Amino acid sequence: MTDRPADELPAGAEAILAECAPLVDAFAAAGRRLYLVGGLVRDLYGGTALEEVDLDFTTDAPPAEVKAAMGPIAEALWTQGERFGTIAAKVGGRLIEITTHRAEAYDPESRKPAVVFADDVLVDLSRRDFTINALAIELTAGTPRLIDPFDGVGDLRSQVLRTPLQPSESFSDDPLRMMRAARFVARLGVVPAPDVVAAMTAMNARLDVVSHERVRDELDKLLGVADPRSGLELLVTTGLADRCLPELVDGPLDAVVAARPDAHFRLAVLLAGHGESAARHRLRSLRHSGQVVDRVARLVSVASSVGGHGPVWTDGELRRLAHRAGAHLADVVELLGLVGLPNTAVAALRSALADLATRDDLDDLRPALDGQQVMEILGLSPGRDVGAALEFLQQVRFDDGVVDRDTAVRLVSDWWAARPG
Ligand code: ATP
Ligand code: MG
């Protein structure tokens, strides 16, 4: 057990500690202890950029006392998580979460009616996922004090990812931790200890008991890391990828990593070679929203339709591409550069599109006439012929660009007259 005095608290801690003062006073006045925990403490000691904007605390006070202590100082209080011991609040404009020490597995899906609380922070820390996350700064002890029972700071320094207890026990308590391991490996550059890798490999099938939503959120976080390569590779080598995202196995990892850190865009890169329906299937099985499924499926479908295109684009082809890609045109081109076309071909496509955009409004590729006008001109009532005429005019819009109304009337009338039958 390594306790460090305040003067060894890392740079950057002071401003946060100052901000915590009102909370600390409230808990101290109630005779309770308050500890700063979670990713923020880890990132303070690991010297990584403080991505964490929310503050996580743990306390020996039961939730009812937490509410009572927070009442006078919080601008807002949320109690939805109270059953799990978590009270959320806004203090000084900052979102915070205070969770009563837990004595058992951290499992939001547990069917158990109530969480068992502990009065000892060490018990709470021992139930956390990794040693580097099992750090706490005690704030109510007078001088702030680091509590580091598993030498998480040492592991941060030597860049090792270890679990506080046996990895097999930890991952069986909550198999999602195996996915979290991949994220921390990628984000922090830590190397998983051999027993962590062994347990992930032996227990990968346990991921099946975790809800698709939790797996999805964790994968999104991993794919949102600037360089997710080491985490993705860990998923593959441990067999976890087969359980949650099999396309990673033999997938275009270089392209995924080279793509900007937008998780859903990276999924499109990963799935591009599999075609639209496989992409839809995968995203649905991960319980992505309809909006995400549609966006990724559109990118995959448009990109695969132009995969083998040569360097020369006609205006008609460019307009059709722009029409199919809709609002996602820039993403489609970027995606093609990552998985579909050689760099020179992508450069040619970009410049052809830029050139066409100076002559045509690619955001408005509607035909020159609408259905009402077509019906009046051709003397039709609503039905299939109107649709066919509009489709004809759409092809005119693609091939010839914008035509004036008179030309459109003439073209559609000629088309109607020449129509077979
Ligand atoms: P992030 O930067 O994503 O916020 P984080 O480490 O803060 O990373 P959170 O999911 O915010 O992760 O959780 C806060 C803390 O709660 C973690 O540092 C860890 O101690 C603990 N924790 C979260 N999820 C789990 C879990 N599934 N099992 C064990 N401990 C967990
Ligand atoms: Mg966090």
Image (cartoon, rainbow, N blue to C red):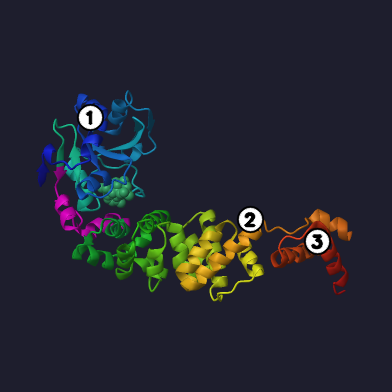
Q: Is residue 130 above or below residue 410?
A: above
For label 2, count other residues whose C-alpha is less than 10 Å away and answer few (under 14), some (14-19) or many (20+): few
Which mark is drawn over residue 408?
A: 3
Q: Helix or strand or loop: what does disc 2 sit on?
A: loop
Mark 2 to mark 3 CA distance (whole Å) = 20 Å
First to last magenta residue range: 147-176
Q: Amino acid at mark 3?
A: Ala
Is mark 1 in CB contact (under 8 Å) with mark 3? no
Which mark is drawn over residue 24?
A: 1
Q: Position of residue 254 (x, y in %)?
A: 37, 69
Q: Position of residue 270 (x, y in %)?
A: 44, 67
**Label 2 sits on residue:** 363
Viewer-proximal residue among 248 and 195: 248
The quadrant of the rendering that contains the C terminus is bottom right
Is mark 2 in CB contact (under 8 Å) with mark 3? no
> Residue 173 magenta-drawn?
yes
In this rendering, the count of numbered labels is 3
Mark 1 to mark 3 CA distance (whole Å) = 74 Å
- Upstream in sequence: badge 1 or badge 3: 1
- Residue name at image x 37 percent, y 27 percent: 75
Viewer-proximal residue among 128 and 209: 128
* Label 2 vs label 1, nearer the camera: 2
Using the rendered view, name the quadrant where residue 29 is placed. Answer: top left
Is mark 2 in CB contact (under 8 Å) with mark 1? no
- Upstream in sequence: badge 2 or badge 1: 1
> Residue 31 magenta-drawn?
no
